[in-house]
Image (spheres, coloured by chain):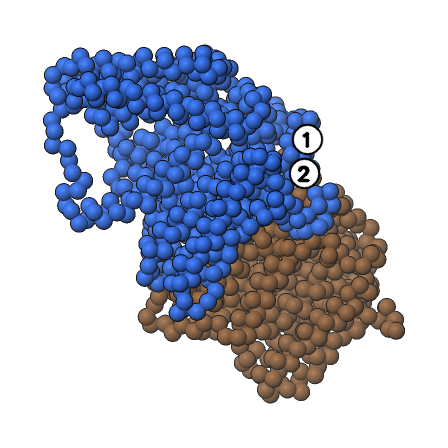
Chain colours: A blue, B brown
C-alpha cells in the first residue's frame, strides 16, 4: 500500500498551504489547510485497517544493501504499532488544528503558528513510521527544535527562557540517543530494525567501559537510547522542561501532551525486541518511571496553577507509562499513552474556557456547600470495605480463572491490575462522594460502575495486547526479561497496598471530623508541612539546574580570564 | 585536446587572471564587485567542466567545488564600498592559489602554500590591533606556518609539514592565527579563509599523517581533545560574535583532528564535515556582516533584538544557518559528523564524552546568540532594514549548499580514481552517507 506515504505528507501540504500565499487569503488558506490534515487522519485509519488485515507496509527510498545511495536513509515501516500511533497523532492533530484556527484568530503570527502545527504533525508521523533507527533519530531531533519554535510568543522573556531550556534539555537526550545509535551501528552494523534485533539476539557482545565492569552490548545501547527517551518523555530528573514550556499557546500543549511527549514510550515499544534483551535497562526504566510517577503526581497536588497542575499530571502519567515499559508491559504502555493522550488533549483544550469562566465569575469554581456526614455510617464503611478488599479479590479471580492471564509470570499485569484498582476506586470514591452520602443506591451504583469499568478496561487491554503483539510468547518473554525478584516485587505491592488503604482510612476519618482523635506524632505533621513546601517548589529542581548553569558559566569565565591574561 | 597536466594550472589561473583584470575597474566599486563575483562563477564553471580530469586525492575533490562557491558567497555578502575593494581582489588571489594548492602536484603546491601563508601574515600585520594580544600571536603563528611550509617545500620532512597543517586546520595551541584571521581580516576574507585554510590543512594532512610516528599521533590526539574542550569554553565565554564563531568552529575542527589522527586517514566524510562546518561558520560571519553593515563594526550583539519581526527574511536564513551550525539534520554538519562517528572504530575512553560535550555545547552558544538577535522586543530607536538582494542571495546559497552537503551521497565527492600517491588508505564507507 504505497499510498500510506501520503499520511505523513498531507500535514506537510497543509503547512505549505498556510505558508505560501498573499496576506489577503491568509484566513481562507488557514481553514483550507484543515482538509489535508483531516485527510491524513482518514488515511491513517485506512492504513491501520490495511496493516491489521494485510501485514506491515515497508517503503524504502534506499537500498539497505548498498553502502552509498542516499545520504539519509528515508523509508517507512508501518506495522500495527506505527499505524496505531499514526491514527492517534493525526486524529489529535486534526482536532488541534481546527481548534487553533479559532483560538489564534487575530494573532499577528497565526500563519507561522498554523504552519508549525502542520509541520510538527508531519514530523511526528514520519518519526513513528520510520523504517530505520537513523531516520527515527533525524525526526527525533527535528522535534526537539519544533518544541522550541512552538513556544510561539518569543517576545515574552519567560516564554523565551522556557523555550531555550526546553531545547537545551532535549539536546541532552539527543546526545545520549546519538551515542546509542552510533554504538548500535558499531556493534551490529545496521540501522534496519529487524536486522538490528536479529543481530543483537544472535551475537551477544560484552563491553568493558573500565576495568572490572562488564556490560552487555544490548544493555549499553538500550541504556543510552533510554536516556534519549527520558528527556522527550519528561522523566525525572530531565522533566523540568515540561512545566517551563507552559507559556506556549494552549493547543500546543494539547499536541505536546497527546503526541510529542509519548515519544519515549513509542521508542521503547519500537525497539521492544532490543529492550527485551536487557533486564538491566528494563529495571532502570522501572525505577526511573516509578520515581517520576510518584514525584510528578505529588508535585501536581501541590501546584496552584491549572496549567502547571496539568503539566505535572502529565509527568506523573509518563512516569507510569515508562514504569509499565520497565515491567515488560509494552502494549499496556501504548494503551496508556493513547488513553492519556486523548484525555489530556481534551482537558487542555478545555482549560482555557475554565480560566475564562473563572475570570468572569469570581465565585467559580463553586465550593460544595454540603457538610460531610459526621456520624459513623455502616453503609459507607461496608462499601469501602468491598471496594478495597473484595473487588480486588474478584478481579484477581476473574483475571486468573476466566481470562487465563498468568499473573505469577507477569508482574506487569499485577501492577496494572493494582493501578486499575487504585485509580478507579479513587475516582469513584471522589465522584460519588461516598463520604457524604449514605445511600444504598449510590453504593450499589458505585460498586457496579467500578466492576463495569474494571472489566471493560481489562478486556480492552487484553484485546489491544493481542492486537499489537499477536505472538503471546513474545509478550511472555518481555515479562520474563523485566521480572523483578519475587521478594522485592511482593514487598512493593504489599507496602503500596497498606499505604493506600491507610491513606483512605485517614481521609475518611478526617472528613468525618475525627482528625482530632487520631494520634499523629508532631514530627510527622511537621514533616508534612516541609514536604508540602518542597513539592510546591517542585523539589527546587529549577533552582538546582540554574545553580548548575551558573557554576558552569563561572568556570567558563574563569578559564577565559586566565587565558586572556596569558595571551595579553 | 588540452594536456591533462595543464588543467589544474588553468583552473588556478582563472581567478588569478580575474584578480589582475579587476584593476581595470578599480575606481568603480560596484563594477569591481560584479566582476569579482563573475570570476568566481567562471572558476566554478571551469572546475565543473574539468572535475573528472582533475587529480583525485584521498579526501576527495569536494573542496575544489566548494572554494569558488565560498568565494562567491563571501563576495556577494559584502556591501559595494570602496574600502572592500582590496579584500575582493585578494579573495580572488586566494581562490586561485587555493585551487592551485589543491590540484597542482608537488613541488608547486607547497611553494604556493608558503606564499599564501606569507601573504596572510602580511595582511594580518597590516590590519593588526596593537592593543589586542591575540593579534600579535596570530601574526606569529602564521609567520611560523610560513616558515614550516617553506621548510616542508624544500625538505619534504614530516614535522614541519604537520606544524603547517596544525596552523592551517587550527589545533590548540596553534589556533591564534585562525582566530586572528577570522576577526582581523577585512571584508570578504574571513568568510572565505574559514574554508580555504582548513581545507588546505586537511588536504596536506592526508600526505603527512601516514609518515608521522605514533608518539606524535598520541600528542595530536591529546591536543585535539583538549582543544575541543578549550574551544567550547572559549565560545561559551564570548560576547563578540566573530570570536564566538572562531572558537566554536575551533572546537569542531579539533574533533575532526581527533578522528583523522585516530584513524590516520582522511576520507570523504572528513571533507564533508570540514566543508560544512567551515561554510556554515562563513555563512554566520556573513549574517553578522549584515548586522555590522547596518549598525556599525563594533555593535554589541546584546544591543540588537527583535529582528524576527522586523527582518523576517534575515531571521529565517540565520535560523537555518544556526540549525546547521548546531549539527541538526538535514544539513551537512550533521551528515559529516555522523559519517565520521560511524566510520570511526569503537572506543571506550574519554574521547566520546568530549565529542558529545562539543556537540551539545554548540546548541547552547549558537542558539543563545541567534535568539538574542531574533527575539525580544523591537527597539523603537533602531532603523530596521531587511536583507538586500545580494545579501539574501549570499545567505541563501550557503543554506542551499548546506542542504546539498547533507543530502548528497559522499561517493559523489570522491572524484577521479587517480591517487596522489600519499600512502593513506581510504576506509570503506559502510554507512550510506
Measuring from the top left, give residue B398's x and y in whole percent. 59, 64
Total labels: the figure holds: 2
Most foreground residue, B401 or B361 = B401
Q: At 70% from the left edge and 43% from the top edge, which residue is drawn?
A: A64
Q: Are marks 1 and 2 in contact (CB under 8 Å)?
A: yes
Q: At 84% from the left edge and 71% from the top edge, which residue is drawn?
A: B6
Q: Quadrant of residue B307?
A: bottom left
Most foreground residue, B70 or A45 = A45
Q: Quadrant of residue B115?
A: bottom right
Residue B11 higher or lower than A480, as above or below: below
Residue B63 higher or lower than B127, as above or below: above
| Residue wearing tag 1 | A199
Residue B407 higher or lower than A284, as above or below: below
Measuring from the top left, give residue A57's x and y in whole percent. 61, 40
Q: Quadrant of the N terminus of chain A?
A: top right
Q: Chain for mark 1?
A: A
Classify residue B310 as left or right of residue B132.
left
Classify residue B101 as left or right of residue A89.
right
Q: Secondary structure at mark 2?
A: loop
Q: CA distance from mark 1 to mark 2?
A: 9 Å
Residue A246 in view here: yes
As drawn, the label of residue A190 is 2
As drawn, the label of residue B45 is none
Classify residue B205 as left or right of residue B107.
left
- Say which label, 1 or 2, has the lower sequence index: 2
Q: Chain for mark 2?
A: A
Q: Secondary structure at mark 1?
A: helix
Q: At 47% from the left edge and 61% from the top edge, which residue is drawn?
A: A17
Measuring from the top left, give residue A464's x and y in whole percent. 48, 28
Amino acid at each position: 500500500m504505497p499510498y500510506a506515504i501520503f499520511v505523513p505528507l498531507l500535514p506537510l501540504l497543509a503547512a505549505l498551504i498556510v505558508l505560501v500565499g498573499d496576506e489577503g487569503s491568509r484566513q481562507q488558506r488557514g481553514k483550507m489547510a484543515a482538509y489535508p490534515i483531516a485527510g491524513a487522519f482518514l488515511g491513517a485509519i485506512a492504513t491501520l485497517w490495511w496493516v491489521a488485515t494485510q501485514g506491515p507496509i515497508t517503503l524504502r527510498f534506499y537500498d539497505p544493501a548498498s553502502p552509498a545511495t542516499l545520504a539519509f536513509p528515508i523509508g517507512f515501516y508501518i506495522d500495527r504499532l506505527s499505524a496505531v500511533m499514526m491514527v492517534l497523532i493525526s486524529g489529535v492533530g486534526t482536532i488541534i488544528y481546527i481548534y487553533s484556527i479559532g483560538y489564534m484568530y487575530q494573532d499577528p503570527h497565526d500563519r507561522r503558528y498554523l504552519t508549525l502545527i502542520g509541520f510538527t504533525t508531519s514530523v511526528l508521523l514520519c518519526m513513528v513510521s520510520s523504517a530505520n533507527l537513523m531516520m527515527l533519530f533525524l525526526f527525533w531531533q527535528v522535534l526537539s527544535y519544533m518544541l522550541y519554535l512552538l513556544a510561539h510568543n518569543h517576545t515574552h522573556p519567560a516564554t523565551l527562557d522556557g523555550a531555550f531550556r526546553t531545547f537545551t534539555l532535549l539536546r541532552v537526550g539527543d546526545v545520549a540517543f546519538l551515542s546509542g545509535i552510533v554504538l548500535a551501528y558499531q556493534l551490529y552494523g545496521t540501522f534496519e530494525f529487524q536486522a538490528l534485533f536479529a543481530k543483537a539476539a544472535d551475537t551477544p557482545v560484552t563491553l568493558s567501559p573500565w576495568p572490572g565492569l562488564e556490560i552487555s552490548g544490548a544493555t549499553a545501547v538500550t541504556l543510552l537510547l533510554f536516556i534519549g527517551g527520558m528527556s522527550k518523555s519528561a522523566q525525572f530528573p530531565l522533566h523540568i522542561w515540561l512545566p517551563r514550556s507552559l507559556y506556549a499557546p494552549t493547543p500546543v500543549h494539547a499536541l505536546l501532551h497527546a503526541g510529542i511527549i509519548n515519544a519515549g514510550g513509542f521508542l521503547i515499544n519500537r525497539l521492544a525486541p532490543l529492550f527485551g534483551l536487557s533486564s538491566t535497562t528494563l529495571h532502570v526504566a522501572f525505577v526511573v518511571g516509578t520515581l517520576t510517577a510518584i514525584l510528578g503526581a505529588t508535585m501536581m497536588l501541590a501546584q496552584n496553577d491549572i496549567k502547571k497542575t496539568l503539566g505535572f499530571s502529565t509527568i506523573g502519567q509518563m512516569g507510569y507509562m515508562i514504569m509499565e515499559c520497565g515491567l515488560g508491559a509494552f502494549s499496556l504502555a501504548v494503551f496508556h499513552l493513547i488513553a492519556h493522550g486523548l484525555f489530556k488533549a481534551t482537558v487542555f483544550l478545555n482549560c482555557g474556557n475554565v480560566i475564562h469562566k473563572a475570570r468572569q465569575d469570581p465565585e467559580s469554581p463553586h465550593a460544595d456547600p454540603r457538610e460531610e456526614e459526621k456520624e459513623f455510617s455502616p453503609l459507607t464503611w461496608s462499601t469501602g470495605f468491598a471496594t478495597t478488599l473484595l473487588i480486588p479479590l474478584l478481579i484477581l479471580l476473574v483475571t486468573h480463572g476466566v481470562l487465563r492471564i498468568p499473573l505469577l509470570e507477569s508482574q506487569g499485569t499485577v501492577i496494572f491490575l493494582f493501578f486499575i484498582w487504585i485509580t478507579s476506586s479513587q475516582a469513584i470514591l471522589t465522584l460519588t462522594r461516598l463520604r457524604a452520602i449514605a445511600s444504598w443506591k449510590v453504593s450499589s451504583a458505585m460498586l457496579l460502575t467500578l466492576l463495569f469499568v474494571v472489566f471493560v478496561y481489562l478486556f480492552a487491554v487484553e484485546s489491544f495486547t493481542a492486537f499489537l503483539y499477536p505472538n503471546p510468547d513474545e509478550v511472555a518473554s518481555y515479562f520474563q526479561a523485566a521480572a523483578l525478584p519475587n521478594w522485592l516485587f511482593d514487598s512493593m505491592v504489599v507496602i503500596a497496598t497498606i499505604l493506600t488503604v491507610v491513606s483512605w482510612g485517614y481521609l475518611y476519618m478526617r472528613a468525618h471530623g475525627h482528625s482530632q482523635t487520631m494520634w499523629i506524632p508532631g514530627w510527622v505533621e511537621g514533616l508534612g508541612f516541609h514536604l508540602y513546601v518542597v513539592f510546591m517548589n517542585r523539589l527546587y529542581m529549577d533552582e538546582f539546574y540554574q545553580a548548575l548553569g551558573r557554576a558552569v558559566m563561572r568556570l567558563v569565565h574563569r578559564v577565559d580570564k586566565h587565558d586572556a591574561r596569558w595571551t595579553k | 585536446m588540452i594536456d591533462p597536466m595543464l588543467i589544474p594550472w588553468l583552473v588556478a589561473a582563472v581567478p588569478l587572471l580575474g584578480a589582475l583584470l579587476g584593476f581595470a575597474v578599480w575606481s568603480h566599486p560596484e563594477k569591481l564587485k560584479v566582476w569579482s563575483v563573475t570570476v568566481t562563477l567562471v572558476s566554478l564553471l571551469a572546475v565543473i567542466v574539468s572535475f573528472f580530469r582533475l587529480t583525485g586525492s584521498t579526501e576527495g575533490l569536494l573542496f575544489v567545488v566548494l572554494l569558488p562557491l565560498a568565494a562567491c558567497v563571501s563576495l556577494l555578502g559584502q556591501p559595494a564600498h570602496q574600502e572592500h575593494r582590496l579584500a575582493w581582489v585578494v579573495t580572488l588571489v586566494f581562490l586561485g592559489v587555493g585551487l592551485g594548492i589543491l590540484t597542482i602536484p608537488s613541488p608547486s603546491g607547497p611553494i604556493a602554500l608558503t606564499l599564501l601563508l606569507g601573504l596572510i601574515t602580511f595582511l594580518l600585520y597590516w590590519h593588526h590591533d596593537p592593543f589586542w594580544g591575540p593579534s600579535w600571536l596570530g601574526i606569529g603563528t602564521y609567520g611560523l606556518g610560513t616558515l614550516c611550509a617553506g621548510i616542508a617545500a624544500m625538505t619534504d620532512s614530516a614535522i614541519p609539514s604537520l606544524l603547517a597543517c596544525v596552523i592551517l586546520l587550527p589545533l590548540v595551541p596553534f589556533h591564534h592565527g585562525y582566530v586572528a584571521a577570522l576577526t582581523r581580516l577585512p571584508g570578504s576574507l574571513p568568510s572565505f579563509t574559514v574554508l580555504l585554510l582548513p581545507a588546505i590543512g586537511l588536504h596536506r594532512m592526508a600526505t603527512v599523517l601516514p609518515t608521522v610516528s605514533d608518539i606524535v599521533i598520541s600528542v595530536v590526539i591529546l591536543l585535539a581533545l583538549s582543544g575541543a574542550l578549550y574551544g567550547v569554553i572559549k565560545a561559551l565565554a564570548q560576547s563578540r560574535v566573530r570570536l564566538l564563531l572562531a572558537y566554536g568552529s575551533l572546537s569542531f575542527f579539533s574533533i575532526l583532528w581527533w578522528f583523522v589522527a585516530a584513524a590516520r586517514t582522511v576520507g570523504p566524510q572528513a571533507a564533508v564535515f570540514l566543508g560544512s562546518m567551515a561554510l556554515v561558520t562563513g555563512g554566520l560571519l556573513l549574517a553578522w556582516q549584515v548586522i555590522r553593515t547596518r549598525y556599525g563594526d563594533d555593535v554589541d550583539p546584546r544591543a540588537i533584538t527583535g529582528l524576527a519581526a522586523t527582518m523576517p527574511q534575515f531571521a529565517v536564513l540565520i535560523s537555518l544557518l544556526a540549525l546547521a551550525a548546531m549539527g541538526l539534520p538535514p544539513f551537512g554538519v550533521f551528515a559529516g559528523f555522523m559519517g565520521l562517528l560511524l566510520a570511526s572504530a569503537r572506543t571506550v575512553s574519554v574521547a566520546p564524552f568530549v565529542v558529545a560535550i562539543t556537540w551539545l555545547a554548540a546548541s547552547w552558544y549558537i542558539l543563545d546568540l541567534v535568539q538574542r538577535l531574533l527575539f525580544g522586543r523591537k527597539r523603537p530607536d533602531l532603523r530596521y532594514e531587511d536583507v538586500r538582494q545580494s545579501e539574501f542571495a549570499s545567505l541563501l546559497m550557503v543554506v542551499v549548499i548546506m542542504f546539498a552537503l547533507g543530502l548528497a551521497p559522499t561517493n559523489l565527492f570522491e572524484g577521479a580514481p587517480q591517487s596522489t600517491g600519499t600512502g593513506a588508505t581510504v576506509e570503506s564507507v559502510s554507512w550510506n552517507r
